[in-house]
Image: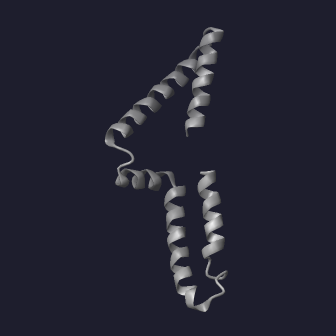
Amino acid sequence: MDDIKRAYRSMALRYHPDVCHDPSKKDESTRLFVQLNQAYETLSNPTLRQEYDHQLGLITAHDESSRKRWKEQLAELKTRSHRKQGSWGSRMRAQNIIIMMNNHN
């Protein structure tokens, strides 16, 4: 997400109509800036991004079901770890799973 935000800011400064000093290119600059805003809105919204990726074929139904199953399993592990303390090893594994899940998102 940080890369998307950086790229957006860089391109916004380049294509913003107020920055365009050539009157003959102002319309083109405005059109590009509007497209840039639309792209940023899509890529910065997780739901819209997933729909966009799905339309491009980057995410298949199998990927989505696998991801859903994986998240359900992680949620179950978190629930189990909160119910009982267990051994030090089991607590460390649960903690590592939570860290991995947070880093994956």
Q: Is residue 6 left or right of residue 47?
A: right
Q: From the viewer's perspective, is residue 12 above or below residue 60? A: below
Q: From the viewer's perspective, is residue 52 above or below residue 29? A: above
Estimate the x, y position of residue 69 in percent, counting from the top left. 40, 31
Q: Residue at x 51, y 22 (%)?
A: 77
Q: Is residue 47 left or right of residue 9?
A: left
Q: How is the image coloured?
A: one colour
Q: Residue at x 67, y 80 (%)?
A: 19
Q: From the viewer's perspective, is residue 11 above or below residue 73? A: below
Q: Residue at x 46, y 54 (%)?
A: 49
Estimate the x, y position of residue 105 in percent, counting from the top left. 55, 40
Camera-side residue: 98 or 63?
Answer: 63
Residue at the outermost top position:
87
Q: Is residue 65 left or right of residue 90?
A: left
Estimate the x, y position of residue 87 in percent, counting from the top left. 62, 8
Residue at the outermost bottom position:
23
Q: Residue at x 53, y 19 (%)?
A: 80
Camera-side residue: 26 or 104?
Answer: 26
Q: Quadrant of residue 6?
A: bottom right
Q: Total of numbered circles in the picture?
A: 0
Estimate the x, y position of residue 11 in percent, counting from the top left. 61, 68
